[in-house]
Amino acid sequence: MPRPKKRPTADHSQIAHHLSAHPYEWGPVRVYPTAYSAEDIARKIQAAEDRFCVYGPAGYFETRTTPVEDGTLLEARYTGGISKPRRRPATGPTSADLMWADAITGLSPATGPNGTT
């Protein structure tokens, strides 16, 4: 049985430095053979614990994992401890907005009870 090919190790110091210079941009950390190993490293990066202290202080990096053909890709981004606000999708007025607009229009002193002046 052939031995599995050895994966290159991640240079976490270099990765953390690069990500810190590019806040809020996702960057690859490494492809891990299993989701479990990728999620374990992701947790350690977020906590900046042990040999992952270069990602410190704790909470300054966010991580995400994505299944890929040869394992699980771990990505990280530097946030400085502040999550980037998510943009809410633009929407039109809600039914409550329309009801309030009708109510305010009905209170206008320029119109009578039947909408006449």
Image (cartoon, rainbow, N blue to C red):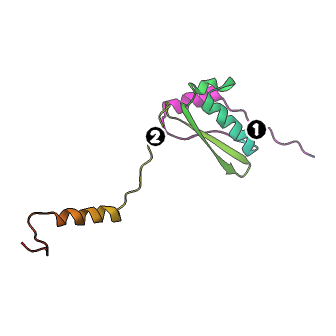
Q: Earlier in the sequence, mark 1 or mark 2?
A: 1
Left or right for 47, reference 109: right
Q: Which residue is found at the position 76% from the left and 38% from the top?
A: 7
Comparing 39 with 96, the one in front is: 96
Q: SS at mark 1?
A: loop
Q: Which label belongs to residue 7?
A: 1
Q: Which label belongs to residue 84?
A: 2
Kind of residue indicated by mark 1: Arg
**Magenta stretch contains residue 37:** no
Where is residue 92, by image quadrant?
Answer: bottom left
Count up the numbered dots: 2
Residue 68 is situated, as x and y percent measured from the top left of the image, at 69, 51
Q: Which residue is found at the position 68% from the left and 50% from the top?
A: 67
| Disc 1: CA contacts within 10 A as few (<14), some (14-19) or many (>=20) | few
In contact (CB < 8 Å): disc 1 and disc 2: no
Image: 48 above or below 102: above
Comparing 100 with 18, the one in front is: 100
Residue 98 is situated, as x and y percent measured from the top left of the image, at 29, 65
Left or right for 8, reference 110: right
Q: Residue furthest front?
A: 113
Kind of residue indicated by mark 2: Lys
Q: Which residues are magenta?
A: 2-30
**Magenta stretch contains residue 8:** yes
The answer to whether residue 37 shows anywhere in this view is: yes
For the residues marked 1 and 2, what is the alpha-carbon distance in whole angstroms? 32 Å
* Circle nearer the viewer, 1 or 2: 2
Q: Which residue is found at the position 44% from the left and 43% from the top?
A: 85
Q: Residue furthest left?
A: 117
Comparing 72 with 1, the one in front is: 72
Q: SS at mark 2?
A: loop
The answer to whether residue 93 shows anywhere in this view is: no
| Disc 2: CA contacts within 10 A as few (<14), some (14-19) or many (>=20) | few
